[in-house]
Amino acid sequence: MSSFVSFTIFGLVSGAAYAIAASGLVLTYTTTRVFNIAHGAFGMVMAFVYWDFVTRQGFPTWVSLALVLLVVAPATGWLVARFVTKGLGEGPVSVALVVTVGLFVGLIGLAQQLWPPAARYVAPFWPEKSFQIGETFITGHQVITILCSVVVAVLLYLLLNRTRIGTAMRASVDNPELLKLFGGRPERVASLSWAIGISLAALAGVLLVSVVGLDYYALTLLVINAYAAAMLGRLKSLPLTFAGAMALGLLTSYASAYLPTEGLLNSVRNVVPALFLFAVIVLMPQAQLRIGQVKGIVSAPLPSLTKCLGWAGALLAFVALLAGWRSEADLLLVGTAATYAIVMLSLVLLTGYGGHVSLAQLTFAGVGALAYAKLEQPNLYGLLLSALIAAGVGALVALPVLRLTGLYLALSTLAFASIMDKMIFQADFAFGFNGTLPAGRLGILGLSIESTGAYVFTMAVFLVLVAFGLLLLRRGVIGRMLIAMRDSPAACGTLGLDIRWFRVGLFGMSAGIAGLAGALFAGLRGTIGSADFQSFNSLPLLLLAVVFGVTSVTGAVLGGTGLMLLPVLSSGDPQLGGLLFAIIGFGAVFAGRDPNGLANLLFRLGRMGESRLGSQIRAKLPVLPGRGEPDPDQGPVDDGSVEVALLDNGSAVGPVDGPVEPVREVGAHVATRG
Amino acid sequence: MSLLEVDDVVVQFGGVTAVNHASFTAEAGRITGLIGPNGAGKTTCFNVISGLQKPTEGKVRFDGKTVNSTPVHRRSKRGMARTFQRLEAFGSLTVRDNVRVALDIHRGLAGLVKPGRADIDALLERVGIAGYAQERADSIPTGTARLLELARCLAGDPKLLLLDEPSSGLDETETDSFGDLLKDLAAEGRGVLMVEHDMDLVMAVCDVIHVLDFGQVIASGLPTAIRSDPLVQKAYLGYSDVEESEMSDETRHDLPAVDVTTEIPVVAGAVGTREAGR
């Protein structure tokens, strides 16, 4: 009985800390519509700052605490609201998610850079004091944690219900435009709520750090617990969020106390928050379709088929060249780059075309790899089957969020990745606890591709095939529907498209592509384990995909190469790892608003060069009989397809007599082909 | 039996009642007007009918069946189509591709084998925007985009068209030919339910008019009867008295007064205050 009481108290204490973190999350989300994935990361960094003040600077505890909670954290929140998240809430959910994931990764990198790994200790508050309830002892720190959550609850209640700015905050939740019309200032509301929100993250971080330890990841990932709690309040209601946090704290505590210490159930204790999240999501009511067009959508560029063929040929030739020339170790790296590039292609489909975000793409690759490793004799069918299994798992993840909006889909992928990491991949039927599995090389038509060079070339062929598949899809019926769905879900719904199932299909297809990449990777490496597909690594993957351009194949290939180079670059100097993370993370924060990314810059340069050179060449050519002078205004089309470009000419020059006929013929020809 | 029956529908947003026990119908082969001052609940009614908004109370019957629990896309499959007050064109697609997507959705798998180019052109021609076929939908004028939304609706060959302020953004000649188009569509047996502020158009084409104010139907009838209805005039013109128009914020007379007989240029400014809550 006494153990039950002490587990209950322990649960309530963790619940109190979750509640503090979660209420900050809810506050920032409701007032700005930006879900801060980096909430936990802010808490982590603030805990480090607190440690720095206390230990390195030697400030007294209360001074450090006041500095962190009342100066550093609010200032950070204010800056973030002012310069990073401003206007994000009105744009596509995918952009806001990418930007905050950028903060997440960037903050971890920053922390590693500022405070390199070392043993650090943060003392609990009021360590000498403890209270006795029956046979159970409660530490002073635990009492303080619970008291803090009560104080936070009361203060938030007073702020929201008894002050002018609080009323403005609540109004901003309902309708920021309306608030503006009535003379309110949504920007001020946003800055204030972010200042408070980050302060609350800091408080939660500081309270938890003596329990969890000063660790970059453990504190950061507590955000999953916080948002699982916030989900019960549907990211709106603070009282329900507190209730959710307490329930979650108790569940986690009881799970660690009473679940068997062996078998699959043992690992359940690590994933209680993620399971809680799924349970809450399943119970959530149907979301209404978003009416009102989303601002700031960027369309994906679409190259012509000839250009694609040319570049594909060049890529394959380059890989063939490498295959015959570079060492085994280098070839493994090329293969890894190809793997990442294919995974990023899966994001091109999902994020670039579809406008959805997945934070678990490497986990899906892991599912594909696992399925592949279980094959007796890997052949093309087996490879396809592995991809299909990953696709099925992807669809299963999307299923519970069928009725909800894109944000919940992204959040459940993060929860899913954590479940796979801590539970499924570690299970005996999978890789085993920190274990690995052997995987054979792929065989095609009975011939196993044993040489690494040939295998890497095969991977490049698959990369090209998937890329072509995507481009064809983008040109066709599904591509148009994806764009339509992104531009206006409400219109798609009222035109008769069942968006929910379309989304599940899209998600499944994307997971399938990632699974294919994972399976190929397994064959490349020969031995794979859960460490190869750690959920956290899906985040830099997403960020690099966006920075290099998540709307184009070029972006995916460049991004894949970049991601492969990361560990290579930082292998010489472990310090560099943190710096690279910080660069990628904060780079994505600034580049995240344009998903066309760096690749688009290349395209623009290419087009500029083309038009310069092209005009020079044209000037030197004799004018053909029956052709008018080239129209200087009609430059290359920005992002339309060839089809559109040609048809464009066909109708644009419609009234003019001369050049119409031939152009229209070409247009019609391409149209039927498309 | 009417094609569409809105039966005692109530919609509440928090403490605000946007639609308050509204009941009205729309018949097949007829053009029905739904008018009222800004914020009267017209667009909310459309959202309820098309399934984008769940009513707090009341029923919507379409084609003889209650559709309250029918999802948006299935209502469309049953023959309902709508346009939006705030444009919902697929901005990054061309005008032609907007209609093509609508046809693709309507035809499902059959659309994969039949390109249907001629059908797209016919639809664009019909609403009179064929000249814009290659323009990106976010670059065309508002009026044209509204016609595009109509063309998209027609791709599904709907039984009932819900048009939310379809003529705003059109000039006088365009509005005239739009009126003719509406009559043609009704003559084909389609029901048309139209929210509209252009009273000339409403009076010219509508067979029946329902007037909504504060979420309630305050009058229903023939255009001539509606024009002379004192309640309607009061709802539209408000009080001409200066003192009364300076009443407290809770009264809706702080909205700009609206002239029944002209197109309403002041609408844009007023939209935010009461309709922004949707």
Image (spheres, grey):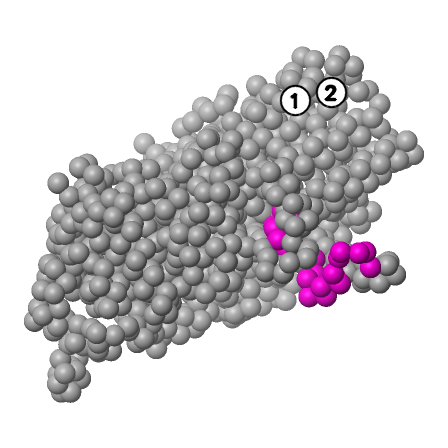
Q: Is residue B185 visible?
A: yes
Establish if A267 lies above or below A658.
above
Relative side of A641 to A166, left or right: right
Please name whichever residue, B209 or A156, is drawn nearer the observer in this view of the structure. Answer: B209
Which image quadrant: the N terminus of chain A? top left
Q: Residue furthest left?
A: B230
Q: Quadrant of residue B228?
A: bottom left
Q: Which residue is disc 1 drawn over? A: A383
Q: Residue at x 25, y 48 (%)?
A: B187
Which residues make up the magenta segment? Answer: A623-650
Q: Where's residue A318, x and y in %?
A: 85, 38
Label placed on residue A442: 2
Establish if A416 lies above or below A405.
above
Q: Residue at x 90, y 31 (%)?
A: A324
Q: Residue at x 9, y 64 (%)?
A: B225
Mark closer to the chain start, 2 or 1: 1
Q: Is residue A406 visible?
A: no
Rate crowding at label 2 as few (under 14), some (14 to 19) or many (20 or more) other CA atoms within 10 Å: many
Q: Residue at x 77, y 28 (%)?
A: A458
Q: Secondary structure at mark 2?
A: loop
Please name whichever residue, A6 or B220, is drawn nearer the observer in this view of the structure. Answer: B220
Residue A642: say if magenta.
Answer: yes
Q: Main secondary structure of the magenta part?
A: loop
Q: Are marks 2 and 1 in contact (CB under 8 Å)?
A: yes
Establish if A268 lies above or below A131.
above
Relative side of B26 to A390, left or right: left
Please name whichever residue, B151 or A375, is drawn nearer the observer in this view of the structure. Answer: B151
Name the kind of residue labelled 1 in the image: Leu
Residue A474: say if magenta.
Answer: no
Q: Residue furthest right?
A: A325
Q: Where's residue A403, x and y in %?
A: 37, 40
Separation (CA) of disc 2 from disc 1: 8 Å
